[in-house]
Amino acid sequence: MKLTLKIWRQKDANDKGRFVTYQVDDVSPDMSFLEMLDVLNESLIHKGEDPVAFDHDCREGICGMCSLFINGKPHGPEQTTTCQLHMRSFKDGDTIVIEPWRAKPFPVVKDLVVDRSAFDRIIQAGGYISVNTGSAQDANNIPIPKDKASEAFDAATCIGCGACVAACKNASAMLFVAAKVSHLALLPQGDPERAIRVSKMVAQMDAEGFGACTNTGACEAECPKGISVKNIARLNREFLRAKFIEEVDKPLEELAEGK
Amino acid sequence: MSTVATDIKLDAKIPEGPLAEKWEKHKFNIKLVNPANKRKYDIIVVGTGLAGASAAATLAELGYNVKAFCFQDSPRRAHSIAAQGGINAAKNYQGDGDSIFRLFYDTIKGGDYRSREANVYRLAQVSVNIIDQAVAQGVPFAREYGGLLANRSFGGAQVSRTFYAKGQTGQQLLLGAYSALMRQVAAGKVQLFPRTELLDVVLVDGKARGIVARNLITGKIESHSAHAVVLATGGYGNVFYLSTNAMGSNGSAAWRAYKKGALFANPCFTQIHPTCIPVSGHYQSKLTLMSESLRNDGRVWVPKTVEDAEKIRRGELNPNDLPEDRRDYYLERKYPSFGNLVPRDVASRNAKYVCDEGRGVGPTGLAVFLDFRDAIKRDGRAVIEAKYGNLFDMYMRITGENPYEVPMKIYPAVHYTMGGLWVDYNLMTTIPGLYAIGECNFSDHGANRLGASALMQGLADGYFILPYTIGDYLARMPYDKVPTTHPAFKDAEREVENRIKKLLSINGKRTVDEFHRELGKIMWDYCGMSRNAEGLTKAREMVVKLREEFWSDLKMVGVNEEFNQTLEKALRVADFFELAELMIIDALHRNESCGGHFREEYQTPDGEALRNDEEYAYVAAWQYTGDGNEPVLHKEPLVFENVKLTQRSYK
């Protein structure tokens, strides 16, 4: 196949950036999308030009490092990660537009590489169960119904790639936050910190500058792991529940001061 | 002449006493750092996979100040995330006769008797704590309807001791360790350095006191000082270019430690996994594993004749139309009792043999069929779909072929490296204060790792072993910090800067990937699934020659002071070129076959691996003595007091 690529090039975070057009020939339908970019980069290096920077690591759809906004869709036309997208999804002569994730909380590092450390900071705010190594009881002391465990697992399969944010017109990170809040709220081990966790994670999400959710469902449609928007409903419920608990538990002085 | 002292006495520091009591006694005997003093010590942990993240989190919980480094954009990306099958633990929840001793025994035997008894026993002991810890963190393991944990069986074991979370066990365990790590970042006990890559280990007065690292965004070369350094940087399977490892996985941290004096053990022990999706073209960048459970129902075959194979390769013959009497079900033919379920190394080696004979299939001729036709005929499509549906979907996505209708094509791929930095019972390398954990060390898997044991070892080292043993070392260390202005840091920084300058100044014609691909091919052809002295000798010459070309004909772009992925790759590949030679030297010296190391000269009359316990029941630990000098071999004899050495047979 022969393809025309319009790729976003941006030297660093301060550069304005622009689209540059490249032609690639000899593209095999069996290539993965990233291998097609490898071939382009090899030819650029041979010409002494700067290859296109893009994030990738495991190339088997699980590490969440690859990204790319392809023809207006995160991870391209199929519901999978870019590394698992193959060129047989395109036709000879196609023009493909490749951009980085576009969201303010994900600043561009270079070309198609963005900084997603905001996600790490959201997890730091409370996306864990506070248990020190060595203090755990026997694993089978806490029976967990199979369907609850499966539901928690489904939420926990989020790979943190950021496609949900890129897909959302508001650049909302609700699906990412909801996946972690759901995973831990569904399990008895997560119960003691349930209220504080959701409050802190949502506060951090807001502080990072992610937008609000307006229920378009674009996140679920583009999530390579198929994380359900039902988790967002659960996040809203957990958040509200936490607010009530906060109201009740707040020291009287603070309430009196109208805080 | 080398100026390095080579009169090292390797001391594994294995505690005295009966096997089952060694670890408990050792924990009691080692020195402790009191809680108030722990905050006076800084520890660097490089790598944030299962071993690194669990170690960094646990050390921080204990009160140490931790600096955690990874080259990815987030610690959650480390390649442990890709592990599929499960994690072993001697819980005996199924009541099927499992025990700590049985897990120990299976691991020693599976490793073909080339690992240390005391380490493996301890691994089996702490395996049970790992499951408790993971569940407490909220890791959503598979469960039965009664709410208790589910188990499945795995290769090399006759009990069900593998805990799993669908085919994403590594992901769930890593996210558990990552969440523990993030909690300590929030608590201010761990400082995180993502997109930062170690380029050297810094020694002061013979002790590991820090690292020099490159900020991958700015290119800035930065020094970090500490009281101890922990390497949790994984394996070096990417020396072969194509492997199931992540693109960024590399051996540089271990290699830099080796060049600073840490001994490198059993570098030639690599695991080749038999069921991977074959290479589809020269542009191929990595290989994807398909769970080996497929061999329960799939039949492995190739055409009997080269002519038929050629026709299939050219697309002139549909494999479904090839009559039964022109097919060779070679595993069933050669191993009638185990058939398609022979262990990984045997299955891999035989696939290579038939492809070498020209009977391979697929466009490149490097594939064999894994055929579900008979299973579908026998059980119906619905049964096969229920068992393997997700794997078939993944296969279809990658290859574009429907395995319900045409036989699947598979080929072995490099998957794991059992070799690594030599460590003693405390997981310390031969450099005081430098530790190696997880796949980065050599300690527990001998010459072959069993399935579902990599996750176990990484977490055992990180959660339950290192956090104890490192205290014994630190308790003897003064609190004073070495400033990064110390000449040792400045020398290391200069050395790193010179290496980068040298790479960037080569004005050649071939790209890093072109060199890496060529290096990988040499290693795969001569130091892969089966090896012989003649081929290894030739391979060594080829690697040395190619390495010279690399340093004179490399095409580089860009500068150091920027986000430069080409430079990142070049630095890693430069180290792979040196490590490759050591792997060959080790493979050449070990005149026996064991586990993943199959030397064609040493096989039984039926073509199986033939160990030589008289002469080679030792760990081969290699010492660096300067560029261009031969490395010096040190032997740690392996003493087996609790298991009897036997010959494996799968006929």
Image: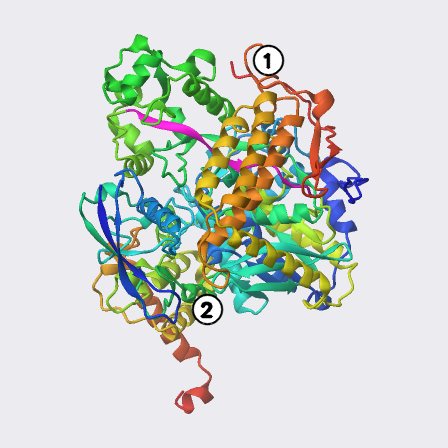
Which of the chains bears the disc numbered 1? B
Q: CA distance from mark 2 to mark 1?
A: 60 Å
Which of the chains bears the disc numbered 2? A
User: In the figure, A102 relative to B155: above or below?
Assistant: below
Q: Quadrant of residue B537?
A: top right
Furthest residue to the bottom? A257
**Where is the N terminus of chain B found, in terms of image quarters?**
top right
User: In the figure, B362 relative to B220: above or below?
Assistant: above
User: In the figure, A104 relative to B201: above or below?
Assistant: below
Query: What label does residue B604 carry, if any?
Result: 1
Name the residue beneath numbered marker 2.
A125
Q: Are marks 2 and 1 on the same chain?
A: no
Query: What is the count of numbered marks?
Result: 2
| Nearer to the camera, B358 or B127 | B358
Q: Secondary structure at mark 2?
A: loop
Q: Position of residue A98 (x, y in %)?
A: 27, 56
Q: Secondary structure at mark 1?
A: loop
Q: Is residue B40 left or right of residue B330?
A: right
Amino acid on which the number 1 mark rests in the picture: Thr
Mark 2 closeness class: few <14, some 14–19, many ≥20 residues within 10 Å: many
Q: What kind of secondary structure does the magenta stretch mostly adopt?
A: strand
Write the start and end of the magenta stretch as one range.
B407-423
Amino acid on which the number 2 mark rests in the picture: Ala
